[in-house]
Image: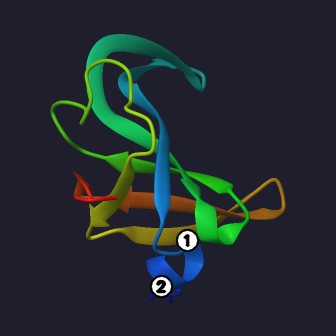
Amino acid sequence: MSIRPIIDPIATLGKTLLLVDVKAAYERIEKGKGEFEKTDKITHYNYTVVALEKKFEKISIKIDEPRPLFDDEIPSNVYFQFENLTITPYVSNGWIQLSAKADKCVVIKGA
């Protein structure tokens, strides 16, 4: 049994998130010997946001949606909420990193 810490997304990121980028992530097929080949199949989208209340720190949030929220250019000053946002810590090269995933990205009305 492994114990996983629970991270409060609002305490970690704040309430005000500004979308700066949306990128498709593509399926990767293992070719062998630790090598992978990227396919044309989109598996999810990564939404990069800036946490305004946290000194403009950036974080990428994975969302398993069939289409991105915006097909073209991201409108200026768009703020979001993420449904069922979870943040999980992991270690990479001796540093603690954060991985974020949500069910859905929703535009906040009147922001």
Residue underneath mark 2: 8
Q: Position of residue 35 (x, y in %)?
A: 57, 19
Q: In the image, residue 37 lies at what x, y percent?
A: 47, 13
Q: Which mark is residue 13?
A: 1
Q: Name the element at disc 2.
A: loop
Indicate left or right for 101 with 41 as reference. right
Which residue: 38% across, 58% down? Answer: 101
Q: Label 1 is placed on what type of residue? A: Leu
Quadrant assignment, res 82: bottom left
* Nearest the eye: 2 or 54: 54
Say what secondary structure mark 1 lies in: helix
Picture layout, residue 99 above or below residue 84: above
Distance in Å between CA atoms under marks 2 and 1: 9 Å
Which amino acid type corresponds to the residue marked 2 in the rendered image? Answer: Asp
In the image, what residue occupies the spot 67% across and 69% down?
A: 54
* Mark 1 burial class by Cα count in 10 Å: few <14, some 14-19, many 20+: many
Q: Nearer the viewer, residue 25 or 91?
A: 25
Dot 2, how many residues are within 10 Å of its Cα: few (below 14), some (14-19), or many (20+)?
few
Compared to 84, does 80 lie above or below? above
Q: Quadrant of the N terminus?
A: bottom left
Q: How many marks?
A: 2
- Colour logic: rainbow
Image coords of residue 74 (percent x, y): 38, 29
Instruction: Give the left or right position of residue 7, taking residue 62 as reference.
Output: right
- Farthest residue toward the front? 110
